[in-house]
Image (cartoon, grey):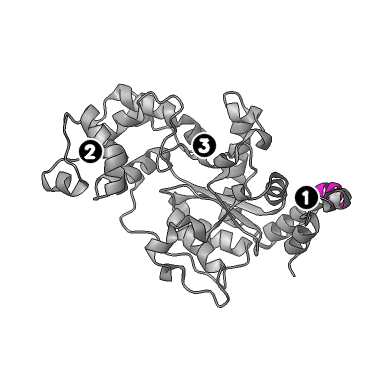
Amino acid sequence: MALHQIIYQRIMPQGPAAMEACRGFLLLLLFVGPMFLMLSIYQWDMSLEGREGVRQQELRKQQLRRQCDGDGFAEEKRSLEDINARHLENLIVDDNYGVIYCYIPKVACTNWKRVFLVLNQSKPYPDPMSIPDENVHIDSKYTFLNRFPKFEIKAKLKHYTKFLYVRDPFVRLISAYRDKFQHQNEQFYQNVGKHILRRYGHHSDPPKTVHEAFASGVHVSFYNFIQYLLEPRTGRPFDPHWRQMHRLCHPCLIQYDFIGHQETLQQDAELLLKILRLEDDIKFPPSYKNMTSLDSVSDWFDTVPLEDRRKLYELYEEDFRLFGYRKPDELLDG
């Protein structure tokens, strides 16, 4: 049995009466647990010394901690005690390997979810691409962190390997727009598209269905989408596909062990699978060839006025800073 499974069984009481009995063990674990984790990471680093991926991970984590510890981030003044379970709804758990993944829509989440579904099956693991698309986004197929009691959430966050993947914030917005408004997506058309067309697209009575809209040449423009994002929205959170990444994964409260970037997706995935000792069992699916690139950002923003570009940057500035993405001065300077 793996070490994390032994620890898990020891610290998870089976009833209220067992809580007192395991309290001493929990206190010991608070001091001993980090030592095991540091030793494991040290041994892994030494075996891969000099590898660019290892160095890049350290730089990314240093950038994150530096920004979180600086001025201007309200989340740094909070703790996990202040977070409602609803705010942890993007964290998926695998108890067999002791892994927690915070998924961010439009950042390779479909393929990482495929990997988690494969891990729920017996060895030899099937190819993740053999998982049908319709099965990937069914929440009941995953174990989410927020479904556990609070003391169990804390234990898992302390001892499991935690990772997330991020992406240039503006490129992610372009990808979300292309996916949800340049294809016939009935759900997003009804929930968001018709509102945007009425308010910004000069369509007082937009087509009733997305099929009718496409047939008549009516569509949400990219600038219309940006106008919608800039709407005042007190108490109304963004849809997860364009919600700020830090609001989905809380990186100033949760100490992630691995930060992957969409821009180096395949290299990072191979490195992470090695960390998890899964490199011989699972191959991460290849990237899509039509992935939105940094090179095309300027073309997309040609239709967006300078003032709106600046407001949009302010809206996503924390994501740029926390995850080390360059401020797009060429889009923001007059």
- Seen as rendered, the residue at the extreme bottom is 124
Q: Amino acid at mark 2?
A: Val
Q: Nearer the viewer, mark 1 or mark 2?
A: 2
Image quadrant where one finds the C terminus: top left
* Residue at horizontal 71 percent and vertical 55 percent from the top: 41
- The image quarter containing residue 310 is top left
Residue span colored magenta: 25-31
Q: Earlier in the sequence, mark 1 or mark 2?
A: 1
Q: Amino acid at mark 1?
A: Pro
| Mark carried by residue 220 | 2
* Residue at horizontal 40 percent and vertical 48 percent from the top: 106
Neighbourhood count class around disc 3 (C-alpha, 10 Å): few under 14, some 14–19, many 20 upward = some
Q: Residue under circle 1?
A: 34
Neighbourhood count class around disc 1 (C-alpha, 10 Å): few under 14, some 14–19, many 20 upward = few
Image quadrant where one finds the N terminus: bottom right
- Seen as rendered, the residue at the extreme left is 216
- Tag 2 secondary structure: loop
> Is 79 inside the magenta-drawn segment?
no
| Mark carried by residue 105 | none
- The image shows residue 231 at horizontal and vertical percentages of 35, 25
- The image quarter containing residue 308 is top left
Q: Earlier in the sequence, mark 2 or mark 3?
A: 2
Q: Nearer the viewer, mark 1 or mark 3?
A: 3
Measure the C-alpha gap from mark 1 to mark 3. 27 Å
- The image shows residue 213 at horizontal and vertical percentages of 16, 44
Q: Residue under circle 3?
A: 247
- Tag 3 secondary structure: helix
Q: Earlier in the sequence, mark 1 or mark 3?
A: 1
